[in-house]
Amino acid sequence: MTLAPEHTDLRVELLVDQRWFPVCALTDLTPGRGVAALLPDGRQVAVFLDRAGRAYAIANRDPFTGAYVLSRGLLGSARGRAFVASPLLKQRFDLTTGRCLDDASVSVTAYEVRTG
């Protein structure tokens, strides 16, 4: 995805503890791939840009293995919902809600994301 010149200075921000926290420039993200970011309190988040240009963020820790790997997962969609599949055991996590699509009793934190 090539951004128009007026979009090259856009930042990706996450709502953390009722405050917007800048994570990276939108141009730092590659559509279809994730990156890991560190929040000020030490939490890791996985930030994604889908091929339509929408940004998402969820906790980076895979609750099934304890490994910080969700940013390395594969993006997909099911029933119109974007998800990431863990690279280890392949459980899928909804990128909007953090809910595990394969085990309703498990979820990860999902963050509100804005670009501006």
Image (spheres, helix red, strand yellow):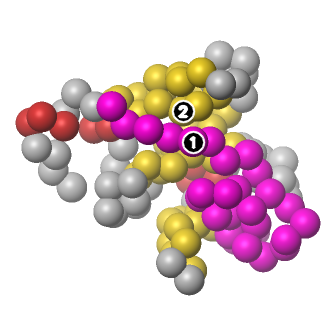
Q: Amino acid at mark 2?
A: Leu
Label 2 vs 1, first from the N-terminus? 2
The reply to whether residue 67 is in sight is yes
Q: What element does badge 2 sit on?
A: strand
Labelled disc at residue 14: 2
Q: Amino acid at mark 1?
A: Glu
Q: How many numbered markers are drawn?
A: 2
Q: Position of residue 114 (x, y in %)?
A: 44, 38
Residue, disc 1: 112
- The residue most toward the bottom is 79
Q: Position of residue 57 (x, y in %)?
A: 57, 45
Q: Residue at x 33, y 63 (%)?
A: 51
Q: In this rendered view, identify the residue nearer to me: 69 or 37.
A: 37
Q: Magenta includes 83?
A: no
Q: Position of residue 34 (x, y in %)?
A: 49, 50
What secondary structure is the stretch in magenta mostly built from?
Answer: loop
Q: Magenta includes 91?
A: yes
Bounds of the magenta segment: 88-116
